[in-house]
Image: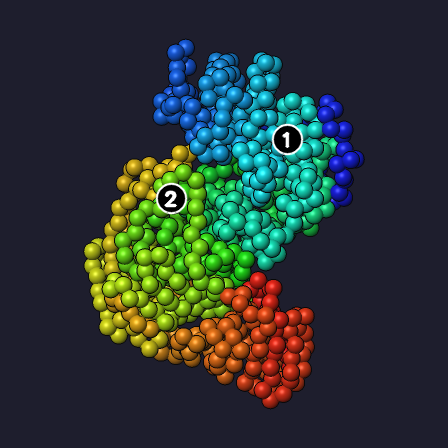
Amino acid sequence: MTSTGTAHASPAADTTAGAPATADVDTLLQRAESLLTGGGFDPTDPDFTPAVEALDTTAEELWDTLDRGATRTALWPDLAPLTDPGNFGQSYTRLRTLATAWATEGTSLGGSPQVADALVAALRFTHDTAYNPAKRETGNWWFWEIGAPRALMDCSVVLRDRLPAADLADYLAVVDRFCPDADRRTNSPTLSETGANRTDKAVIVALRGLLGRDAAKLVSARDALSDVRDSGRNSLFRYTSSGDGFYEDGSFVQHDVVAYTGSYGIVLLGGTAYLLALLAGSEWAVTDPKVSVMYDAVERTFAPVVFDGLMMDSVRGRAVSRERAGDHRDGATALAAILLLASGAPSAYAERWRALVKGWLTRNRTTPFGTLATLPQLALAKAVLDDTGVPAGPRDTGSHVFADMDRVVHRRPGWACALSLSSKRISAYEAGNGENLHGWYTGDGMTYLYDDDLGQFNDGFWPTVDPYRLPGTTVDTRPRTDLGTGAGTSTYRPANAVAGGAVLDGRYGAAAMELIGAEGTTLRARKSWFLLDNAVIALGAGITASDGRPVETIVENRNLGTDGRHRLMVDGLRQPAEQGWSGAFGRARWAHVDRVGGYVFPGTTALRALREQRTGTWRAIDTGADTGGSTDPVTRRYLTLWTDHGPSPADAHYAYVLLPGASAAATAVWSRSRPVRIVANDSTAQAVEARREGLTAVNFWRAGTAAGITSSGPASVLVQRRGAHIRVAVADPGRTLTTLSVELPFPVRSVVTADDSVSLVPGRRPVLTVAVGGSRGHTHRAELNR
């Protein structure tokens, strides 16, 4: 496709509003159809066979169950009454699937006049019965303003040569009623649309403009991406410092306070890529030079949270409860969006992205892309895989603190660790409309370990895992009630300020979160993670509660699949593999789980272990109108390791080390040799020293001294000494300070380089002064000479 270019054209330079669109429209309508059906792919190519067969199977089932009778009251019996927003919204989605199959060569329904006539009649019936301009919005606004109109416009694109003119006019009118533009929420005109919702609506308005040959609508859709109406306030091509959108540190937030890269972020990326591709080369092409923000987001925002093609659950919000949208499927959608964006991006971007995606595609053999992709998505991927000039990019490495969404990601060649934190700024969870009913502790420091087992969180994890024992969390064991059972979505933000950390040289990280339990518990804890080359050191201190209930810290809760018998060793002794076994080890030094890695307990710990087979249903965690899971039982085996702090603990603590991928022998050696030393773990500071790397990392909870480093207030500090060269990274993850002083325990003569926010008083006890105010918890850096 033609490049979108880089020079911005103002609305005044475009087609006059209200004038009829030009002959470009026919070309763009055909392009819109190809973006839905895959266009001119070769149906005899075996690479496309699985996608064609999957579409055909789904469409045939929908066709067989479609009520085509003259006295029908709904299109499908399970979507009655049709007047319910969830039901007519899903009916349009099913009709789109049928229309796509009808327009796709190689399917059993392809080109059938009977199918086409039935589709035309079904669209008319749905309009007259449930979705027309005379109706008033009820229930979930999304079905009225995004879900239904998008599917209706897609159906109209595919069936445009068969729709009666009067029918098409009616469908354009209903879109004009419920989605007249992308700038405002129709049911709340003072509310500006942001993020993914704005993108979704821009696509709808563009398709409505093409079908109605209305240049003004096309201008409106294009300009909505840049928010011309409100002078760029809600532009998708800008960095924000609060609320929805992209942040310069790579964060993406939707619903004002939810880390949502892997759900709404993908929708925004995919919708923008779609419009860039759809309108490319036309007089309505997107030419805002700030589209580079979207280009940069591929590697800054999305790539760090994609692991071998799957999208990390820590940034998928309530979508983790959706049976039909697991991490592999959302990852595949992100990959396809990146490839579509590459089709019109400058070559410097596109070449890097294609290599990145090719690496993800070739490494994910657990859930091959072809089993998840639509035909147009598969065509994009096949072009990259077949291109010998595109190398397969390696796994990314690096440490990332996404301070603006309370997420941390640490990536090494063989594994990755993601931390899901929360604060008074970013929610601990989002639930609502029947989704994410058991998400109570997902933002309390849940620790995701990714390795070659790409099915860990995708293989029935969420309906079967014990939601009170999520890895990395410290929890009060009180019973909880289901979340989000009412209409609308809601979020919970805890009262703590500290959540975040600092990164040194893109390689090492220190993360901290003050845990303040939700209403109903007095639980408090101070939690730290130190992220190194081959280890994650997890520390907890000040664990206190007065409710009489046991408090636990979960070291691991590993999904072993349907029949896993992964060997567990504790201090060199092999433990039983029978389901239902449990063990208590009063002074455990280390443990090892086969095919996962090692766990070291410096100073020993009272460790509990459990093997259990758990059964649950997707319906138990998601009853959403269009996302609700099945009631079919799902059974998986788990191996859980935890520390029991007892009822009403007072100033309890924990310390453990994750050694991802380590052998049992290597774990035992690590336990004896202690290459990383814990030098503080109390209410003032938590600190470690990695002697081999010359690294000291401290999370200060208040002014104090640890590992020889003195801080004037709460902070995350990392210091690395290599000969005469010193690197320092400092952050204020609680965002409570204006300036921060850090005194180092060795002489420093001069500054090699430093951020503008950092100044130095050299000497035998040098002092760095860091202007942390207004930096929103981001890292400040300096390089010094001894």
Rendered image: mark on residue 365: none
Residue 104 coordinates in the image, percent (x, y):
53, 25
Residue 112 in the figure: left or right of residue 650 = right
- Residue positioned 36% across, 22% down in the render: 77
Q: Is residue 191 above or below residue 452?
A: above
Residue furthest toward the top? Answer: 70
Q: Amino acid at mark 1?
A: Ala
Residue 745 coordinates in the image, percent (x, y):
54, 85
Q: Amino acid at mark 2?
A: Gly
Res. 754 in view? yes
Residue that mark 1 sits on: 206
- Residue positioned 21% across, 55% down in the render: 579
Q: Are marks 1 and 2 in contact (CB under 8 Å)?
A: no
Residue furthest toward the bottom? Answer: 764
Helix, strand or loop status at disc 2:
loop
- Image quadrant assignment for residue 643: bottom left
- Residue positioned 64% across, 73% down in the render: 758
Residue furthest toward the right? Answer: 13
**Is the residue marked by circle 1 packed among few (<14), some (14-19), or many (20+) residues within 10 Å?**
many
- Image quadrant assignment for residue 149: top right
Residue 228 in the figure: left or right of residue 746 = right
The answer to which of 627 and 597 lies nearer the viewer is 627
Residue that mark 2 sits on: 484
